[in-house]
Image (spheres, rainbow, N blue to C red):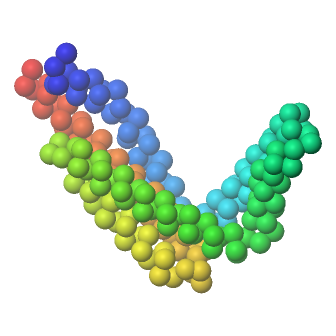
Amino acid sequence: MDRRETQQDFIKTFEKSILVAAGLLVALGLIGILAPNLISFSILVFMGCVMIVGGVFFGYYSYQYHTRSFVGWLKPLILITAGALILIHPGAGVAAFTLVVTLYLFMDAYASFGLAYVRHPEPGWGWLFINGLLSVTLAMLLLVGWPATSAIFLGIYIGISLLLDGITLLMLGMKMKKAEEEIQDKA
């Protein structure tokens, strides 16, 4: 199997799913931009609930297998306590979560730069590079306004990041479709 067949198979497999994912990311991004507090606190409530449920499951595990071990009960205690604190004090939770999102944006930028480097000079590498630049910019802006502007900026930045990821996937999908047409024309 030569490189052309491998590329064509890849393009056919992911072409439609990339466009669907792009549309969903664009829609979620727009919601985040238009209703930033809603996105911030929705994510926070979800994370708090997930932590509490995870703590309950770990607690059940500890009850079954580590009844007398303090260390076995430590993780469920931490998860349930942290989840409850997030739900009880959402402002502090948003500020802390903003730092986590800032770390995510730095890692997203690193991944985008890495993918751009790997894909260069294939179609779409520039969009990945631009996505990385914008993710670094958003991360830096989050750090500058922290913690006073956490709730609004967190929602807006998550929205912008999702929107940019969606646009990047859309552009990548369009480039892949064009590349597929070029491969078919050459064949």
Return the residue found at the far right: 68
Q: Position of residue 89 (x, y in %)?
A: 77, 72
Residue 117 in the figure: left or right of residue 131: left
Q: Quadrant of residue 141?
A: bottom left
Q: Is residue 150 left or right of residue 161?
A: right
8 displayed left or right of 56 = left
Q: Residue most toward the left?
A: 186
In terms of depth relative to the viewer, which is nearer, 23 or 108?
Answer: 108
Q: Nearer the viewer, residue 181 or 41?
A: 41
Residue 33 seen in the current view: no
Quarter occupied by the C terminus? top left
Q: Would residue 142 be seen by someone viewing this image from the given angle?
A: yes
Q: Is residue 92 above or below residue 104?
A: below
Q: Nearer the viewer, residue 76 or 9?
A: 76
Question: Where 86 sits versus 143, above or below?
Answer: above
Left or right: where does residue 175 sit relative to residue 77? left
Rendering coords of residue 118 (x, y %): 24, 44
What residue appears at the point 49 percent right and 59 percent down from the top-left corner?
104
Q: Residue at x 80, y 42 (%)?
A: 58
Q: How many marks?
A: 0
- Above or below residue 161? Residue 119 is above
Q: Position of residue 150 (x, y in %)?
A: 58, 76
